[in-house]
């Protein structure tokens, strides 16, 4: 029986990833350790001792410690960053640098197979990164309750909602200078202001609606409510629908952009 | 050679490629027969690569008809590509993988079983003389080695038709001859080769039949021998004069041989007997710095047909 073409593309990605595997394993582990130690424990202690004391900050954060508040938000943000990294330079490389996509297209592999294969690979990378992150959360005592692991698939979904539109963006770029703007004006502001580090209610009133339309806020809130056990069926439905919608729309955009670029 | 009883592997009628308002390929007709070695000769920008990309089913046909291996690239792209080998103009090797990994993963794209791949990788590395580099990264290989690896890769699916776009451009003479030798062996085995080149010596070495392309059109076709017989004289007298002298010669060159071509750096006299033309030139008092008689080549055919040389 014939192997699906996208699985063959995934095989290629995994063959390459074998070399980088160890390095990414270490950074996937160190990244949450450093963030949760510095911001969750260090800054968190300071937050608890701040104006109004522990009770006031806990009220603002929904009755939990800053560490417990922060960790699931960071989980979602990490998924976004991993997805953004895998959807920018490696895509441009396949088109422009070592042009491996052009090599694949000389075989029975098609443009959509390349896209789906890449997304399968990104999905696996996200699974690895988020599972390690979750392991670190457990060690830090930031995963409360047996339902907390649900934040892992939520974070993977968040990552994929970024991967597809960013692949579309990358496929339309002539050189990597656009990636600087993407990270400077997209990824980093989202990371800082989408509720990862403080509740969106702390933002000036006019900025709050902006936060609500960003996919990362939906990812952060989904991960956080699932991790803390405060999720409501309606909330989960809204977030999941939104993220799936963005991922699906991105998939359409990405396939059009890749086809336009590769099939001239 | 072309056998009229077998259907062509490639058949193009009024084949056209447009990029917006630009016509890259302008209604060309050609057939490629099984087992034939067929070339597109022409300068950069003549439309050779666009034609190859349409044959390879990676670039949609804008107009006209094209059939490859009896199928339509519009609807049967993956089935056609399964039986093609492609050597693109620019390498598309995965720089992060080793030499043998590049071949193996390519074999997987044709969904070949791993057992078959293992055997073919060994054979192909031997064929292109890269067995010793099997476990090395691709990145530090020389240009010639990368081209050989790309050729090996294009053979992993034992293609019925091998497409080579400028296979030796940018290589040093030794690397080119090694590559030509490998391609010649494939030709001997009966693999149908279609190649583009702007090197006339490459076309003469490898092609049974070729078309000359210029400005998106086919301007002539035939075997290298036929093209030379039809469009050029048997011999050519080349003369180079001291700087500034060529412009002052005026009518002194007229009537030497069948035809005289003035290039910026030299004068070409087309004649059945080059030595006789050289003697006649001497009798007229012409004293070139350099003078030589050679046989006509495809370069002369190209110059005659298009009024400009292959490599500007």
Image (spheres, coloured by chain):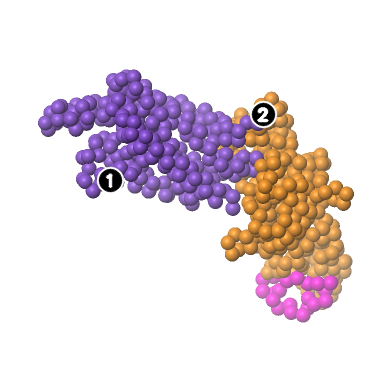
Residue marked by disc 2: A1
| Residue A141 appears in view | yes
**Between B258 and B89, the one nearer to me in the picture:** B89
Element type at marker 1? helix
Q: Position of residue A133 (x, y in %)?
A: 37, 26
**Mark pair 1, 2: CA separation:** 51 Å
Label 1: chain letter? A
Chain-order first, disc 1 or disc 2: 2
Q: Which chain is purple?
A: A
Q: Residue shown at 83%/76% (left/top)? A: B255
Q: Is residue B200 visible?
A: no
- Chain B, which colour? orange
Question: In the depicted view, which residue is nearer to us: A197 or B179?
Answer: A197
Residues in magenta, as a range: B241-262
Q: Nearer the viewer, residue B7 or B75?
A: B75
Q: Residues within 10 Å of mark 1 (few under 14, many from 20)?
A: few
What residue is disc 1 on? Answer: A209
């Amino acid at each position: 029986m014939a192997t699906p073409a996208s699985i063959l593309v995934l095989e290629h990605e995994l063959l390459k990833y074998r070399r980088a595997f160890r390095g990414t394993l270490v950074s996937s582990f160190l990244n949450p350790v450093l963030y949760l130690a510095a911001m969750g424990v260090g800054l968190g202690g300071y937050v608890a001792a701040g104006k109004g004391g522990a009770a006031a900050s806990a009220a603002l954060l929904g009755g939990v410690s800053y560490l417990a508040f922060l960790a699931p938000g960071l989980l979602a943000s990490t998924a976004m960053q991993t997805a953004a990294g895998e959807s920018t330079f490696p895509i441009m490389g396949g088109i422009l640098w070592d042009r491996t996509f052009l090599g694949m297209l000389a075989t029975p592999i098609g443009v959509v197979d390349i896209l789906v294969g890449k997304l399968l690979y990104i999905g696996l990378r996200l699974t690895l990164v988020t599972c390690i992150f979750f392991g670190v959360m457990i060690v830090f005592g930031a995963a409360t309750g047996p339902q907390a692991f649900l934040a892992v698939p939520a974070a993977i979904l968040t990552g994929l909602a970024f991967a597809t539109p960013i692949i579309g963006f990358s496929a339309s770029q002539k050189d990597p200078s656009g990636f600087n703007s993407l990270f400077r004006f997209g990824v980093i502001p989202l990371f800082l202001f989408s509720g990862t580090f403080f509740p969106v209610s702390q933002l000036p009133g006019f900025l709050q609606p902006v936060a609500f339309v960003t996919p990362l806020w939906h990812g952060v809130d989904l991960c956080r409510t699932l991790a803390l056990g405060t999720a409501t069926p309606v909330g989960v439905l809204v977030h999941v629908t939104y993220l799936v919608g963005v991922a699906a729309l991105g998939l359409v955009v990405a396939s059009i952009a890749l086809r336009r670029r590769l099939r001239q | 050679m072309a056998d009229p009883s077998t259907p062509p592997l490639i058949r193009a009628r009024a084949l056209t490629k447009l990029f917006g308002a630009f016509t890259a390929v302008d209604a060309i007709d050609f057939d490629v027969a099984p087992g034939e070695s067929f070339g597109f000769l022409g300068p950069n920008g003549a439309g050779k690569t666009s034609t190859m990309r349409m044959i390879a089913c990676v670039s949609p046909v804008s107009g006209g008809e094209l059939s490859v291996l009896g199928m339509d690239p519009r609807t049967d792209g993956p089935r056609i590509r399964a039986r093609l080998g492609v050597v693109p103009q620019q390498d598309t090797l995965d720089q992060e993988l080793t030499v043998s990994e590049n071949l193996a993963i390519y074999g997987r794209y044709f969904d070949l079983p791993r057992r078959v791949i293992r055997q073919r990788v060994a054979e192909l590395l031997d064929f292109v003389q890269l067995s010793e580099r099997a476990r090395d990264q691709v990145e530090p290989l020389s240009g010639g080695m990368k081209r050989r690896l790309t050729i090996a890769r294009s053979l992993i699916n034992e293609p019925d038709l091998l497409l080579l776009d400028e296979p030796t451009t940018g290589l040093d003479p030794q690397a080119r001859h090694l590559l030509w030798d490998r391609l010649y062996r494939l030709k001997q085995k009966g693999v149908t080769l279609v190649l583009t080149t702007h090197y006339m010596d490459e076309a003469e070495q490898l092609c049974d039949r070729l078309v000359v392309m210029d400005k998106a059109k086919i301007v002539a076709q035939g075997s290298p021998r036929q093209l030379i017989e039809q469009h050029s004289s048997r011999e050519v007298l080349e003369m180079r004069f001291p700087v500034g002298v060529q412009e002052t010669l005026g009518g002194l060159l007229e009537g030497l041989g069948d035809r005289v071509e003035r290039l910026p750096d030299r004068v070409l006299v087309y004649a059945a007997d080059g030595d006789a033309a050289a003697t006649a030139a001497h009798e007229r008092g012409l004293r070139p710095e350099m003078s030589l008689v050679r046989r006509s080549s495809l370069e002369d055919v190209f110059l005659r047909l298009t009024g400009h040389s292959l490599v500007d």
